Image (cartoon, helix red, strand yellow):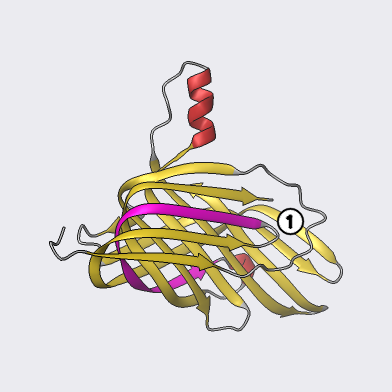
Amino acid sequence: MSGQQREWSCGLLLPLLVLSAAAVRADPSTSYIVSGSTGAALWGVGNQPGTEALIFAFNQAVSVQAAAAAAAAKESPPAPGPRVFFSVTQWALAGDGWVLRQWYGDVPMTPPALVITPDLMQGTLDVTVPGTLVESRASGTTVQRGIPGRLQVTWTGSGDLANSTTAYTYQTALYTTTLQSIGTGRLAAIAATITVPALGDPIPLWGAGSLGAVTTGSLNVTMQ
């Protein structure tokens, strides 16, 4: 680490999206311990009005609940592994009016889906994952699970490497995630393409993000 390392903190509260979800069952929250030499986050908007996305990707994440269950059963704890957390929302004009679509998930990855350089200046994510797709329109709400999509993200770091304390909160009626972490990191610009055939054409995104080496961190996810 640089002898002139700086400190920075970042807090983000993304807006609540109101979405009717009467037909959707609620799942319990899952908490994760996140750590390791690399971690990444992005939030961005697309080139179409009413589109936004959030992606958290980590090389090491382990479920607190799974670890507790293993301990209670006197079994070996689960090993931390790569994991991605994502949510994409998009308004679209359909035949019977406006529809709000949200595709989201919490999925393990296989290396080398996430690659970040040791100096935290460049990062890439390229992974195909299943997610839940919810469509809400005037006529009602439909839910489809196991809908595949591809996440392709490039992070380009900027500024000095710094000690960092981060806190992100993102909330919709269907998906809530809160991340808190301490470590080192850089701010980063992002460029991404999210391809979900069920949503139509690939969605280009750009926005702000970060590249980090997480010393201690926790992430809580609630999905419906």
Q: Is residue 129 left or right of residue 38?
A: right
Q: Residue furthest right?
A: 139
Q: Position of residue 46 (x, y in %)?
A: 53, 79
The quadrant holding residue 80 is: top left
Q: Residue furthest left?
A: 3
Q: Residue furthest top?
A: 74
Please, what secondary structure does the residue beneath circle 1 have? strand
**Residue 60 in view of the camera:** no
Q: Residue at x 38, y 73 (%)?
A: 190
- Vertical side of 60 occupied by 210: above or below: below
Amino acid beneath label 1: Val
Q: Identify the residue under disc 1.
A: 143
Quadrant showing the N terminus = bottom left
Counting labels gives 1
Q: Residue at x 38, y 33 (%)?
A: 79
Q: Is residue 216 left or right of residue 75?
A: left
Q: Is residue 16 left or right of residue 181?
A: right
The quadrant holding residue 159 is: bottom left
Judge by depth and name the residue closer to the eye, 190 or 187: 187
Residue 189 magenta: yes
Q: Position of residue 168 (x, y in %)?
A: 49, 61
Q: Is residue 129 left or right of residue 29?
A: left
Residue 42 magenta: no
Q: Position of residue 221 (x, y in %)?
A: 57, 49
Q: Position of residue 156 (x, y in %)?
A: 30, 72
Which region is colored magenta? 175-195
Mark 1 burial class by Cα count in 10 Å: few <14, some 14-19, many 20+: some
Main SS class of the magenta portion in the image = strand
**Residue 156 in view of the camera:** yes
